[in-house]
Image (cartoon, rainbow, N blue to C red):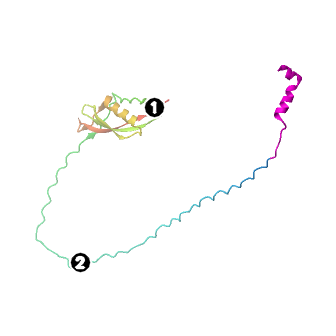
């Protein structure tokens, strides 16, 4: 095999196998004309606003009926009853936070922190005579249920408040408190 390459016989074999190369000229395909794009839809403008005309209608009062029945009596008017004494106004104070025992902030729910949720929850809190929270409910949501639930849980669990009073005596009463959830870096 090496001898064939060395003597140049391999070129003759290649020429025999391949043969002459033929070329043909191919004409370009005719370009198809694209149809023009459809015209844009016509937008109808609404008619201009014309306010309705004001119409003044004159109403003539009807004449009183002519056959009105008149009746007279000879009864003396009775004296008005004596005025009833008004009860003394009740002095009420709403429940409030105790300055000796500051309100605890609820733990920020981790999923709310990751989601970037923040807001203020307005709670209605039923404060008992001893200052403990009897019931708590959401009056205005923060927009995120997890934050609302965390606020209600914390209020019921650990808040102690100054109860509302009537005439100086502690009474169970509803009060409103705001709990703010704010993300800090």
Residue 78, picture quadrant: bottom left
Is 14 placed left or right of 118 in the picture? Answer: right
Residue 8, picture quadrant: top right
Seen at 24% across and 36% down, the residue is: 172
Asked whether residue 141 appears in the rendered view, the answer is yes
Q: Which residue is mark 2?
A: 65
**Magenta-span inclusion, residue 24:** yes
Asked whether residue 179 appears in the rendered view, the answer is no
Which residue is at the front of the view, 11 or 62?
A: 11
Q: Is residue 60 above or below residue 2?
A: below
Q: Which residue is mark 1?
A: 113
Q: Is residue 20 above or below residue 58?
A: above
Identify the secondary structure beneath mark 1: helix
Q: Is residue 93 above or below residue 103?
A: below
Seen at 47% across and 34% down, the residue is: 115
Q: Residue furthest top?
A: 2
Q: 10 Å neighbourhood of mark 1: few (<14), some, or many (≥20)?
A: some
Q: Which mark is residue 151?
A: none
Q: Main secondary structure of the magenta part?
A: helix
The location of residue 179, given as percent across then percent down, is 38, 35
Over which residues does the magenta segment extend?
A: 1-25
Q: Are marks 2 and 1 in contact (CB under 8 Å)?
A: no
Q: Residue furthest right?
A: 7
């Amino acid at each position: 095999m090496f001898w064939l390459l060395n003597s140049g016989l391999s070129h003759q074999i290649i020429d025999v196998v391949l043969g002459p190369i033929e070329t043909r000229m191919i004409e370009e395909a005719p370009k198809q004309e694209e149809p023009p794009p459809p015209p844009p839809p016509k937008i109808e403008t609404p008619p201009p606003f014309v306010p309705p005309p004001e119409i003044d209608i004159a109403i003539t009062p009807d004449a009183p009926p002519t056959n009105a029945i008149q009746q007279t009596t000879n009864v003396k008017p009775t004296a008005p009853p004596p005025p009833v004494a008004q009860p003394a106004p009740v002095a009420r104070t709403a429940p409030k936070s105790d300055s000796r025992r500051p309100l605890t902030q609820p733990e920020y729910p981790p999923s709310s922190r990751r989601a970037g949720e923040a807001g203020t929850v307005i709670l209605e809190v039923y404060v008992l005579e001893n200052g403990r929270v009897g019931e708590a409910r959401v009056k205005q949501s923060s927009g995120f249920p997890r934050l609302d639930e965390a606020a209600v849980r914390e209020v019921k669990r650990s808040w102690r408040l100054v109860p509302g009073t009537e005439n100086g005596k502690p009474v169970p009463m509803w009060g409103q408190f705001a709990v703010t959830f704010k993300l800090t870096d």
